Amino acid sequence: MTHEELRLEETRQKRAHWQRWGPYLSERAWGTVREDYSPYGNAWEYLSHDHARSRAYRWNEDGIAGICDRHQYICFAVSMWNGRDPILKERLFGLTGNEGNHGEDVKECYYYLDSTPTHSYMKYLYKYPQAAFPYSQLVDENRRRDKHSQEFELMDTGVFSDNRYFDVSVEYAKSAPEDILIRITVTNHGPERAEFHLLPTVWFRNTWSWGNESGQRPVLRELNGAIELEHHELGERLLECDGRPELLFTENETNLQRLFGAANASPYVKDGINDYVVNGASTAVNPAHVGTKAAARYALSLGPGETQTVRLRLARSRRAEEPFSASFDDLFVERMREADEFYSTVIPTDLAPDARNVMRQALAGMLWSKQFYHYVVRDWLKGDPGAPAPPAERVSGRNHEWSHLYNADVISMPDKWEYPWYAAWDLAFHCVPLALVDCEFAKQQLVLMTREWYMHPNGQLPAYEWAFGDVNPPVHAWAAWRVYKIDKKRRGVGDRAFLARIFQKLLLNFTWWVNRKDSEGRNVFQGGFLGLDNIGVFDRSAPLPTGGHIEQADGTGWMAMYCLNLLAIAMELASEDPSYEDVASKFWEHFLYIANAINHLGSDGTGMWSEEDGFFYDVLHMPDDGHVPLKVRSMVGLIPLFAVETIEPRICDRLEGFKRRLEWFVEHRKDLTHNVACMHTPGEGDRRLLSIVDSDQLRKILRVMLDEREFLSPYGIRAISRIHHEQPYVLRANGMEYRVDYEPGESSTGLFGGNSNWRGPIWFPVNFLLIESLQKFHHYLGDDFKVECPTGSGQMMTLWEVAAELSRRMTRIFLKGSDGRRPVHGVNHLYHEDPNWQDLVLFYEYFHGDNGSGVGASHQTGWTGVVAKLLQQSGDRVTGHDRAQIALEVPELEAVSGD
């Protein structure tokens, strides 16, 4: 085992708490639902960026390159000042959902460069302009632009011209679980000497102002040139600061005078250090050197190209030896070597150096995106004893049906600035790349969402804080099965306790889906927008202007996939416990009912499948019981491909009860089994195929999907066919026109906030599932089944080769081409030409359907982190792993036997 794997094992066995401290500090707490106490849910406006420096947060803290303990009692982050800004740079700036022409958007340049899963070593880079930060320019210019214009970014302002910026590199290395070494390196890239004020800051999350905490108030105080921390839950800590900087103390309390014109209880408030440094307010910090927030001020002067380093150490107590001796830097060398050692077991060695760099940064982003998430809905609804009562509208407003929800955990975030709240279906995808480095954490995350203080008593999983009751695709079972397989391959034995535990809870969730989203009991599912935001003709979460409802091809496809995921899990568990055989039979039968329904909706035999077009469509079910196919060529019609599994003959032979039931259905319910791939015909290795589509339908769908004039982009599969660029889909109803156009980049509408677009871009989660589905189909159909790829090219490929081709197209978004450019960075010349930017990679929320440039949230590793898994698989192909070995992780039933 590597040194890092030993630390993971110590953590798993609870012999050492290496993960007690980590990058669990959010990058944005302002503008969140949790901090919103307005009457009408105006979260962005209630607590703004301008207020954030002065207002104590109720639920969780934020900062730059920060860390905290797993309960966020103690926080540490980096603040800085260039001598020109009107405020300290304590937190990342960005536009609110209403300010941005495409919704909320961070306007900073920062990068997650490295992290081990125990956070024994971490590295973060922030690029700070030397000119005054253009806060107003960013707001005003983006407000001026409409939704048909591109966003105005920090780089567009010219603040990085002539390299007039600082690189601020923040590194952490743990000597022990409670001994954290901190190294901050500042480099002046500009042509002239420049002043830089560095303020490493430590503070307590405010738990004492709300009237419901029984513990005593924590305290920070100066102790012999260091900062002593005393907390009633964590005990004592000491932050030692090299070089004897000026120590500044204040309180993490709201500045009522600045915000509301009311008197402050103390002259020392949250923005006191800001006022002291920026405005020269000498009375803003406590001369007694005590408080609940403190900073060590380093005034640096750096010549052109000069680098200076600041060192700090956060530990339980003062060490006997000198804290900043040569052993300090030696430990960083050791932890960096151990990080390299660990990743050499994760990242295939035969990947090209650039691909290894991309994979490592993707995994670093996954690990840096952990966040302490705190939201107790019952307390939020009723208010705190020490604060004014919430508005009356809250009683029946947002999330009032989720009063059981108690969130106080470290959770993987989609993006710690743009989406600093968990999203259930995003989290499922996060767990696949996370499992490459920390299977225990991935499993814990999946189980957490199903715990009784998260899952609704009716079985629904919480969606996200903006509306916990929204419906997301049911991918939790898929992720659990996928993580189980990755863990089993890595350790040689599967964690059956985890699988059984989560299976029991998923049965509740499946029942909720059947009872709530199959409105007429016909195995046809609606579900609403299902995470695909603006993909449809209508807002699928709102009442339809035509009346009636939409029979959703994606909702029904997702549920067919859900059935097969649970079937796979049940059969794995049945291999040692026969009582699961009956449950496996139940999901096999339910899958058949759904497959029948997707092809036969009404008495007229209308289905979601169009034989003429060779594609699946949503169907509008009118109030008069008529059915109108909504012929938008979109990802909605590809999602039924996700419902596919193969069964090995030896598995059926061993599970006799399941085999008898399956054979009875095949023989006696031909009205159902004729709607799925043929169960009589064995495939490769005498396997049986479970799929909504048969081989003829598969060919027809792939003919459309692999057409570069339609779905196939140089960078993956588009969410909507490019054919709608010339032929937009138009539906007229009740005197109104509803249309869907191909929009490969940002959305031109404000639907779902306007910062998301499913009408043309490349989205990694669904592309990842398409690749996996093709691998499964190949497992049954074998090398003799070939399709043209791209359509019209004359080049024939097996489905395994098509999957590999899609993976290649997706990963090239991040890789340098022959011209040295990464498509993800678009036309930005700094990333392509400047050696200080060239190796930095951002993992966006989605990607332009034609040129591959990043769009949406810029740090969404996040589900875009699945690129790490794609790169790993491509590396396995390079190193000669055969398809059977790679397939061991693909959740097919052939691996149930444990081979």
Image (cartoon, rainbow, N blue to C red):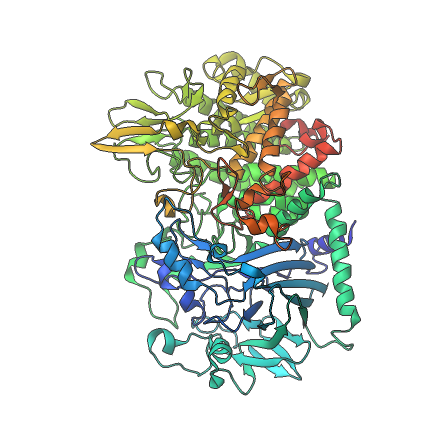
Foreground of the two, 884 or 506: 884
Foreground of the two, 10 or 785: 785
Image: 624 above or below 72: above
Horizontally, residue 477 falls left or right of residue 398, namely right
x and y percentages locating residue 202 in the rendered image: 58, 72
- Image quadrant of residue 368? bottom right
Residue found at x 38% / y 56% = 141
Image: 277 above or below 758: below
- Image quadrant of residue 394? bottom left
x and y percentages locating residue 718 in the rendered image: 48, 33
x and y percentages locating residue 707 in the rendered image: 50, 24
Foreground of the two, 302 or 314: 302
Residue found at x 78% / y 60% = 334
Judged from this view, the residue extending furthest toward the bottom is 288
The answer to whether any part of residue 787 appears in the image is: yes
x and y percentages locating residue 109 in the rendered image: 54, 57
Image: 492 above or below 164: above
Q: Quadrant of the C terminus?
A: top right
The total number of labels drawn is: 0
Residue found at x 71% / y 35% = 876
Foreground of the two, 652 or 680: 680
The answer to whether any part of residue 405 appears in the image is: no
- Image quadrant of residue 254? bottom left
